[in-house]
Image (tube, helix red, strand yellow):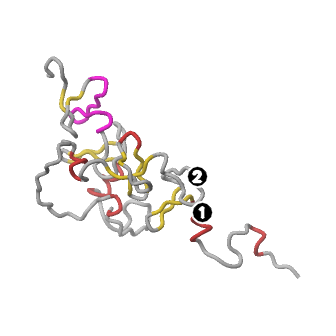
Amino acid sequence: MPVWGGGNKCGSCGRTVYHAEEVQCDGRSFHRCCFLCMVCRKNLDSTTVAIHDEEIYCKSCYGKKYGPKGYGYGQGAGTLNMDHGERLGIKPESVQPHSPTTNPNTSKFAQKYRGAEKCSRCGDSVYAAEKIIGAGKPWHKNCFRCAKCGKSLESTTLTEKEGEIYCKGCYAKNFGPKGFGYGQGAGALVHTQ
């Protein structure tokens, strides 16, 4: 029961959670902005959360980290996938030695990454309210654009090459197959006499 002038402590950052910003999960309280997957940092809700010990994950990352592995699991019948989740920050099972921190920020995420993450495009700090994860890296919403044409991107419309992100059209134009018959549409391969 919370005492006067406060509330429960957040299961992620450890700070006081007031009723207006509280999300409850597995008997613990979280700030809405702290209720994130431990791996991909996506916002969670009651339909997308999966719990393992004291850690919370989205169902996708939970399945990759703790779900069944091997032939036929994860992407449909007959699929063999050797992805162990490295691009999502899931490391093979190994015990990491504890290293104390001098960082005054009590957030586990901030301690792990030594403060606010840096945008992959502009290099400035990216905070939770403006952060988008794409190609495994943090971006500002305004920086999450195609490197060639500047078109705004979504996680489903981006492609990545050498640390830079592109829309599918620019990626195909600049890095796709070249030569006769590519890129001109259906009439390009018509035989004429």
Question: Helix, strand, or loop for circle 2?
Answer: loop
Neighbour tally class for label 2: few under 14, some 14-19, many 20 plus, Cα within 10 Å: few
> Which quarter of the image is occupied by the N terminus?
top left
Residue 30, image x and y in percent? 25, 34
Residue 145, image x and y in percent? 52, 53
Query: Which residue is outermost to the right?
Result: 193
> Which quarter of the image is occupied by the C terminus?
bottom right
Which amino acid, by three-letter code, is at mark 1? Cys
In the rendered view, tell whether residue 88 sits above or below residue 51. Answer: below
- Locate residue 142 relative to residue 127 in the image: left or right: right
Residue shown at 31%/46% (left/top)?
Answer: 37
Residue that badge 2 annotates: 151
Residue shown at 37%/47% (left/top)?
Answer: 126
Figure label count:
2
Q: Quick one: label 1 or label 2, which is nearer the N terminus? A: 2
Assess whether mark 2 and mark 1 are in contact (beta carbons under 8 angstroms): yes
Measure how far apart labels 1 and 2 are at the Cα level: 10 Å
Which amino acid, by three-letter code, is at mark 2? Lys
Q: Residue 112 or 72: which is nearer the viewer?
A: 112
Q: Quadrant of residue 15?
A: top left
- Locate residue 155 relative to residue 87 in the image: left or right: right
Question: Helix, strand, or loop for circle 1?
Answer: helix
Residue 8 lies in the magenta-colored region: no
Residue that badge 1 annotates: 170
- What span is colored magenta in the figure? 19-34
